[in-house]
Image (cartoon, rainbow, N blue to C red):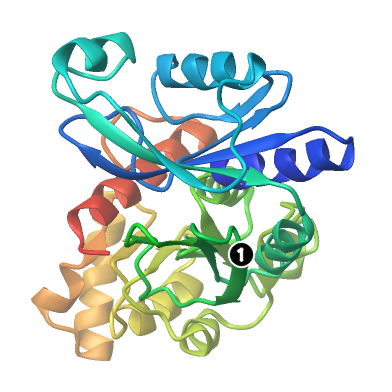
Amino acid sequence: MDSVDLQVLRSSVAWLGEGHRVILATIVETWGSSPRPAGAMLAVRGDGLVAGSVSGGCVEDDLIFRIRNKSLAVEKPEIATYGISKDEATRYGLPCGGKLELVIEPIRDNKSIIELLDRVDRHELVARTLDLDTGIVALRPASRADAPLIFDRKRLTTVHGPRWRLLIIGAGQLSQYLAQMAQALDYSVTVCDPREEYADTWNVEGAVLERGMPDDVVLAMGLDSHSAVVAVTHDPKLDDLALMEALKSAAFYVGALGSRKTHARRVERLKAERGFTDNDIGRIHSPIGLDIGSVTPAEIAVAIIGEITQRLRQEPS
């Protein structure tokens, strides 16, 4: 699956290929309450068709109107501000006192966007830098430590690709739902399962399948503070191996499927056989997921991705 912003770029490439004019708008800063965060993108085709979102709708409507009637004849990148006053904030669908600033750029050559998308499809992180004076775009490799957006009013740099990683231990039905949801939230997803009967039927496009033992896979991935691990095989021979190494890593989230009784037995094993302390084991989220009364595999996946998101937003990025 694509994130919303990657969908915007893919739509831009398609429209340019069809001969349309395309304007790309990127939120570079917000003040007060804003419906969309910095980095959110909107593409507007010359006839007014849009992809993406930068507000509740009224900013989009204004841009569409101005592009259709040619009053927004952008020849090079420029800065636009919406919601300066209370009345204007209300007019453009922003919460009272809200304000947002956009960089608006005409997209004429889709070669750099195609290259960016190709590299993201290879699970690379890519920084795209736009020079506002010249309109020239440069691409370079990025890291997860890079800020997702930097804007100094001369250059706009945005980072594209999966800044977050999710390792799922187990390739069952629950994992399929979880992998799809995580990819929709911009995670690079790896699924580990050495069991042929599960691995052979794995079919989630975009998720990397590893057939090695879980502890080896965790070590090979070099999990950092942008990583999450969930063990959902319900088989202690596999889940424990992953948890042992995950607890030694800087992963921001570690979770394991199982009831309270199952987790209590897991705690005993990790303490007695592996020497983990209460503080170490306290990092494990189990029973896994938010308590939303989930029953089906899809609902459990919602609960898990919800808890991962909750934890992510509590951590510094």
Viewer-closest of 173 and 28? 28
Residue 114 in view here: yes
Residue 1 in view here: no
In the rendered image, which quarter contains the C terminus?
bottom left
The x and y percentages for residue 119 are 69, 69
Q: Is residue 274 left or right of residue 140?
A: left
Q: Identify the residue shown where x is 30% and y is 9%.
A: 91
Q: Residues within 10 Å of mark 1 (few under 14, many from 20)?
A: some
Q: Residue furthest right?
A: 18
Res 13 quadrant in image: top right
Q: Is residue 288 left or right of residue 189?
A: left
Tell how many labels.
Answer: 1
Query: Of helix, strand and loop, which one carries label 1?
Result: strand
The x and y percentages for residue 275 are 20, 90
Q: Is residue 176 depicted above or below 155 in this figure?
A: above
Q: Identify the residue shown where x is 28% and y is 55%.
A: 312
The x and y percentages for residue 28 are 36, 47
Q: Is residue 249 left or right of residue 85?
A: right
Q: Is residue 251 depicted above or below 155 in this figure?
A: below
Viewer-closest of 157 and 33? 157
Q: Identify the residue shown where x is 47% and y is 58%.
A: 232
- Type of residue at label 1? Val
Viewer-closest of 82 and 270? 82
Task: Quickly name the residue at label 1.
Answer: 137
In the rendered image, which quarter contains the N terminus?
top right
Q: Is residue 104 left or right of residue 139?
A: left
Q: Is residue 75 depicted above or below 98 in this figure?
A: below
Viewer-closest of 27 and 196? 27
The x and y percentages for residue 296 are 50, 31
Q: Residue furthest left?
A: 278
